[in-house]
Structures are given as structure tokens and as C-alpha cells.
């Protein structure tokens, strides 16, 4: 029983990171129809920049804020110089562009920070919390709480603000959105900034638990894509549900079946779900987009 | 040039038309024959061989991506499975290499058929996700089934021999891979110009319209997927014997991405574009290697720039520009 609880804790922690990554995929997909294969690099950049700032002597809080700001700036630049000029290109062409961007970002980190692993200190110590025989790192609480706050904040942003409603309108019908005065080009740039922020936050939160390195973003990005697909591309509720479900599935696979096939579990489940429901669990619903 | 003498369309004019249509292929074959005389040492032979392998893979993948509009982000899995099929059957079970190659190709073809039947119902990004997933599962399985595959360290593969004739060394293998490349160019060219090829292009344009004029959409897509996977498996088998060593990386996501990149940058639905794309991306690592640490950045930047300025790929975009200047 305590092992089961332990696996739930682990699964929820990693699942929250996947949920943040999946929301990043969904926001960009909604705003532009692009699957951003550089999303994983935003996650990696968040962790790496924060870790190197701390290593250089910056206080943790400052390092976190600066890292998120830096990654948002990178996201905006990517949208401006790589995605916007190719608007209207074929899906395959856009996929290749985001893959190219991910190589530039990964190579940039490799060239400037090296191939070694980097660590970030836990936000509030590493004394494990014992709960019903299972242990949990305080960092896991940080991950869960921050993810909840971010999800609630995003929901408010999309429902209450003019900008958020503009993004939703663009997702539903670009032409109609333009007709009522939404600047759809700004929506695209903004969606990249927002997704970069989500990725950076996820990367920073998970860095104290799992070491980060220049190539850590590849698998995390793919898992985020899996989570977004499970939930249904473009669905915000689906992204969160898909991320948490994927995290739990992985930790259960590692605990009860085989830790070697932990990474394969994600891709097996996404295939099964696509075959049963070709547009994901929440993909058909159009009103529940976040 | 034969338009004026159309009524007297005799054997000679048909022959000249054949020669005009085949001129690029004939020139290319001539270049392949002369090339070994110029190449100074085995290093250059190795580079030429890698280009030929990638070009053959890219042509086969382009039939799928460029002509039917179906993306595959897991195509390296078929290449890797072909390589491991030959490696395991020859090294562990002592099969003759030729039989192992055919058996691996048949197995991979059958697997691709089953996969295609199931996943080609998906479209766009969901198809990309499904093919990517299959590729990742295959490479994870290859690294974890240590008893069979040697795990992440890989396994060595004996030399290739057929009917007592052993193929050893870069200079011998050059002719094998030059031959497979020419075969791929000729067969893909014939396929594209056949009624089946026109059906494929119709599919890319509009599935509904194609179906309305009687093109059996799903059957065509499945056949092309299986063809392209089988070619990848055969090349995998030959590659395994050539290098003498296989690792799970052959089937990995980065290799799949590399293949798609060659197709898209070279030019979708362009056979010569695939050859060009394969040449560029096989040479780039050699040329950029001196910029240690910065080669990934350069590679990514070239990719982005090409796609922005030549969105249809290098060969078709430049072709269109030259054409405009002529007329």
C-alpha cells in the first residue's frame, strides 16, 4: 500500500511537469496550428539557465525569475524570426522549422554550458515528508502547488482578459477573429511567449529532482506532445488530464512492470488511445479549450 | 523537338524521347562510374557510400511524404529493424546473409503492413505522433532486449557474402550502394510516371476528390508505406554488413528526423531533390565538424533558413526559378 502511495506521489510530480509542457503545445497549436518541437528545449533552458545563475552566486528567487524572463524572450524571438516568416507553409515544413529551432537552442546550450549535468538546489530543503508510510520530497509539493496556480491563472487569463479571449477566438476561427479586430499576428507571438514561460517553469520546478543537461529537453518535449495528444490537441483540460495520467502511468509501469520500459509506456498508451479515439480524449470538445 | 514529326513517330523519335527523359539518370550513372577514379582514399569512399544509403532511404520516404502527403517521424525504425534482423539471423543463427536480408525485409514489410492498416487512418499531427511513437518504442526495445540485441552497446555483424562471393571493403561496397541508388531512382521515376503515380499525386491534392474519381485512397497509402518501409529494411541489412556493427541509435528518433529533413529540404515530391538533400545532410557533419560544438547550431539555422526562403525545398524552388527565367 505504501509503495502504491509512493508511486502516486512520484507520478503526480512528473505528471505536473508533463501537464505544463502539454499546455505549452496546446497554446501554440491553438494559436497557429503548429506543433512546436522546440517546446522541450524551453523546459531544458529554464532549468539550465536557473542552475547556472545559482552556480554563479545569484539568489534562488532572482535566478528563477531571470530564467523565466530569459526563456520568454527566447520564445518571442523564435516566433518573430523563425515562425512568422513561414506563415501559411505546409504542416511538414513548419514541423521541420521547429525541429531546426530546437537544434539551434540545444546546440547553443551545449556550446556555452557544456555537456555535463547541472543541478538546482531544492526550494525548501530536502528533508523528506513521511505520509502514511510513503515519503515525498518538499520539492514535489512545490511542483504540484505551482502547477495548480499556473493552471488556475491560465484559466482566468483565457476567460476574463481581452487578450486571452482573443487567443481563444483565433483558435476557433482565425478569419472571424481578424474581422472582429483581433491582431492574430500578435496572438502567434504571444502564444510562443506564454508557452516558453510554461516550459521554463516546468523545467525549473523539476531541475532539483532530476538533474538537467543540454539534451534533457528532447524526451520531456516528446512526453509533453504525448500528453497533449492523449488529452486531445488544443484542449487545455485535456493537456492537464493527459499530463497527470501520463505521469501516473509511467511511475506505475516503473514500479510494477519494468523500469526499462517506463519511457515506452507513454508511446504505447498514446497509440492505443489514438486507435480508439483518433482525436484524443478531449479532442472533439470545442468549448473546453483553455 | 520531335513535335513537328509527330505523325512519323517512328522508333528513332521514340528512342530520342527516351534519351531526353532519361538524360539526368544516364548522366548520373556516368558520374557514379567515374567517381571512384577521382576519390583519393577510402575515407571519401565511405562518405560517398553514406550519401548513397541516405539518398536511397530518402527517395523511398519521399514516395510517402512527398507523393501521398503522409508524414512518418519513425521511419528509422524500419531501417534499424532491417539492420538488426540481418545482424541477429547471421551472427546468432548462422543464416546465409542473402537469406537473412530477404527474411528481414519480408518481416519488416509484414510489420509495416499491419502498422499501416491501423495508423494510416490518422491524419496530420496525430499521424506524426503515432509514427514517432512506433519509432521510439522500436529503439527502446532494441536497447533493452540485451539477450537478443546486445543492448545499448550494440552487436557486431559478419561480412556479407552471396554465392561464395564476399563483399569486403569500401571500394567493393561502393558498387553495391551505387547500384541500389540507381535502382531506387529508376524505379521511383517509373512509379511516379505510372497510373499509380498519378493516383498518388491526386491523393496529395485532395483525398476526397481522388476518391471521387475512383482512386482507392487507403489501399494506395498502405502500399506506398509498405514499399517505403521495405526499402528501408533492405538498406538497413546492407548497412549492417557494410559497417559490421549495429547500435539501437540506427532506429532512433534523431535518425528518423534526419531522414524527414533530407526529404523536405531537398524537395518534397522530387526524386533528385532527395538525392540532393541526402548529399547535403551527409556532407554537412563532415564539413561542420571543425566548428566543434557549434555544428548543431549551424545545422539548425540552415534548416530554418532553407524552410523560410525555399519552403518547397531546394530542388523544386530553384527549378521553378530557372524555369521562369527560361520562358
Image (cartoon, rainbow, N blue to C red):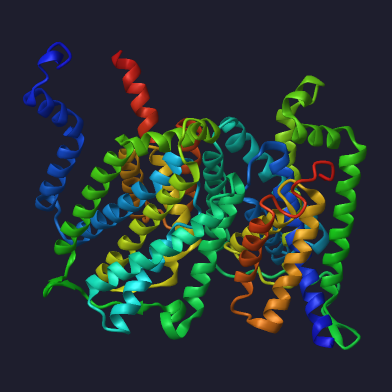
Furthest residue toward top = B4
Q: Is residue B276 left or right of residue A138?
A: left
Identify the residue at horizontal 11%, vertical 48% (top origin).
Answer: B33
Where the N terminus of chain B falls, by quadrant? top left
Q: Position of residue A260 (x, y in %)?
A: 59, 79
Q: Position of residue A101 (x, y in %)?
A: 56, 46
Q: Is residue B289 left or right of residue A54?
A: left
Q: Nearer the viewer, residue B289 or B150?
A: B150
Q: Position of residue B286 (x, y in %)?
A: 33, 55
Q: Is residue A210 visible?
A: yes
Identify the residue at horizontal 14%, vertical 17% (top origin).
Answer: B2
Q: Position of residue B310 (x, y in %)?
A: 45, 32
Where the C terminus of chain B falls, by quadrant? top left
Q: Nearer the viewer, residue A176 or A80?
A: A176
Q: Quadrant of residue B285?
A: bottom left
Identify the residue at horizontal 41%, vertical 55% (top origin).
Answer: B226
Q: Is residue A32 left or right of residue B199?
A: right
Q: Is residue B294 visible?
A: no
Identify the residue at horizontal 26%, vertical 53% (top origin).
Answer: B52
Amino acid at each position: 500500500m505504501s509503495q502504491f502511495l509512493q508511486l502516486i506521489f512520484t507520478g503526480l510530480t512528473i505528471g505536473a511537469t508533463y501537464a505544463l509542457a502539454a499546455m505549452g503545445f496546446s497554446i501554440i497549436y491553438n494559436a497557429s496550428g503548429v506543433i512546436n518541437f522546440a517546446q522541450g528545449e524551453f523546459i531544458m533552458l529554464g532549468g539550465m539557465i536557473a542552475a547556472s545563475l545559482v552556480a554563479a552566486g545569484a539568489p534562488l528567487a532572482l535566478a528563477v525569475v531571470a530564467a523565466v524572463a530569459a526563456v520568454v524572450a527566447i520564445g518571442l524571438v523564435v516566433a518573430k524570426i523563425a515562425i512568422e516568416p513561414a506563415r501559411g507553409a505546409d504542416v511538414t515544413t513548419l514541423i521541420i522549422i521547429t525541429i531546426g529551432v530546437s537544434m539551434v537552442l540545444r546546440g547553443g546550450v551545449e556550446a556555452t554550458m557544456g555537456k555535463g549535468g547541472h543541478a538546482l538546489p531544492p526550494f525548501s530543503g530536502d528533508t523528506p515528508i513521511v505520509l502514511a508510510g510513503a515519503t515525498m520530497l518538499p520539492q514535489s509539493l512545490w511542483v504540484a502547488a505551482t502547477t495548480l496556480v499556473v493552471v488556475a491563472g491560465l484559466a482566468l487569463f483565457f476567460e476574463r482578459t481581452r487578450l486571452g479571449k482573443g487567443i481563444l477566438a483565433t483558435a476557433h476561427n482565425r478569419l472571424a477573429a481578424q474581422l472582429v479586430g483581433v491582431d492574430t499576428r500578435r496572438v502567434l507571438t504571444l502564444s510562443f511567449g506564454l508557452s516558453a514561460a510554461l516550459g521554463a517553469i516546468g523545467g525549473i520546478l523539476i531541475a532539483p529532482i532530476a538533474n538537467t543537461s543540454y539534451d534533457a529537453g528532447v524526451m520531456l518535449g516528446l512526453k509533453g506532445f504525448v500528453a497533449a495528444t492523449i488529452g486531445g490537441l488544443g484542449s487545455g483540460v485535456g493537456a492537464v488530464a493527459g499530463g497527470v495520467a501520463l505521469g501516473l502511468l509511467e511511475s506505475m509501469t516503473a514500479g510494477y512492470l519494468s523500469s526499462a520500459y517506463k519511457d515506452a509506456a507513454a508511446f504505447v498508451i498514446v497509440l492505443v488511445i489514438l486507435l480508439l479515439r483518433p482525436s484524443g480524449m478531449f479532442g472533439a470538445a470545442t468549448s473546453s479549450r483553455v | 523537338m520531335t513535335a513537328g514529326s509527330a505523325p512519323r513517330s517512328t522508333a528513332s523519335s521514340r528512342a530520342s524521347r527516351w534519351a531526353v527523359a532519361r538524360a539526368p539518370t544516364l548522366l548520373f550513372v556516368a558520374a557514379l562510374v567515374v567517381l571512384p577514379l577521382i576519390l583519393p582514399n577510402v575515407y571519401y569512399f565511405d562518405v560517398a557510400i553514406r550519401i548513397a544509403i541516405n539518398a536511397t532511404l530518402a527517395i523511398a520516404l519521399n514516395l510517402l511524404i512527398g507523393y501521398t502527403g503522409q508524414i512518418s517521424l519513425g521511419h528509422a525504425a524500419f531501417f534499424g529493424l532491417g539492420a538488426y534482423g540481418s545482424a541477429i539471423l547471421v551472427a546468432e543463427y548462422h543464416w546465409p546473409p542473402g537469406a537473412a536480408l530477404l527474411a528481414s525485409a519480408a518481416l519488416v514489410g509484414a510489420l509495416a503492413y499491419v502498422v499501416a492498416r491501423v495508423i494510416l487512418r490518422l491524419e496530420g499531427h496525430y499521424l506524426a505522433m503515432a509514427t514517432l511513437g512506433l519509432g521510439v518504442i522500436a529503439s527502446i526495445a532494441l536497447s533493452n532486449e540485451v539477450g537478443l540485441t546486445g543492448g545499448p552497446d550494440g552487436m557486431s555483424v559478419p561480412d556479407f557474402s552471396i554465392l561464395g562471393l564476399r563483399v569486403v571493403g569500401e571500394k567493393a561496397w561502393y558498387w553495391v550502394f551505387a547500384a541500389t541508388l540507381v535502382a531506387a531512382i529508376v524505379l521511383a521515376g517509373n512509379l511516379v510516371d505510372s497510373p499509380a503515380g498519378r493516383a498518388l499525386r491526386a491523393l496529395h491534392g485532395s483525398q476526397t476528390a481522388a476518391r471521387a474519381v475512383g482512386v482507392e485512397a487507403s489501399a494506395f497509402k498502405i502500399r506506398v508505406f509498405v514499399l517505403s518501409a521495405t526499402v528501408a529494411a533492405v538498406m538497413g541489412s546492407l548497412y549492417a554488413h557494410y559497417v559490421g556493427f549495429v547500435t539501437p541509435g540506427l532506429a532512433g528518433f534523431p535518425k528518423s528526423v534526419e531522414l524527414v529533413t533530407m526529404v523536405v529540404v531537398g524537395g518534397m515530391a522530387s526524386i533528385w531533390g532527395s538525392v540532393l538533400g541526402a548529399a547535403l545532410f551527409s556532407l554537412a557533419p563532415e564539413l561542420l565538424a571543425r566548428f566543434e560544438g557549434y555544428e548543431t547550431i549551424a545545422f539548425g539555422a540552415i534548416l530554418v533558413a532553407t524552410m523560410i526562403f525555399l519552403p518547397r525545398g531546394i530542388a523544386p524552388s530553384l527549378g521553378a526559378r530557372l524555369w521562369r527565367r527560361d520562358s
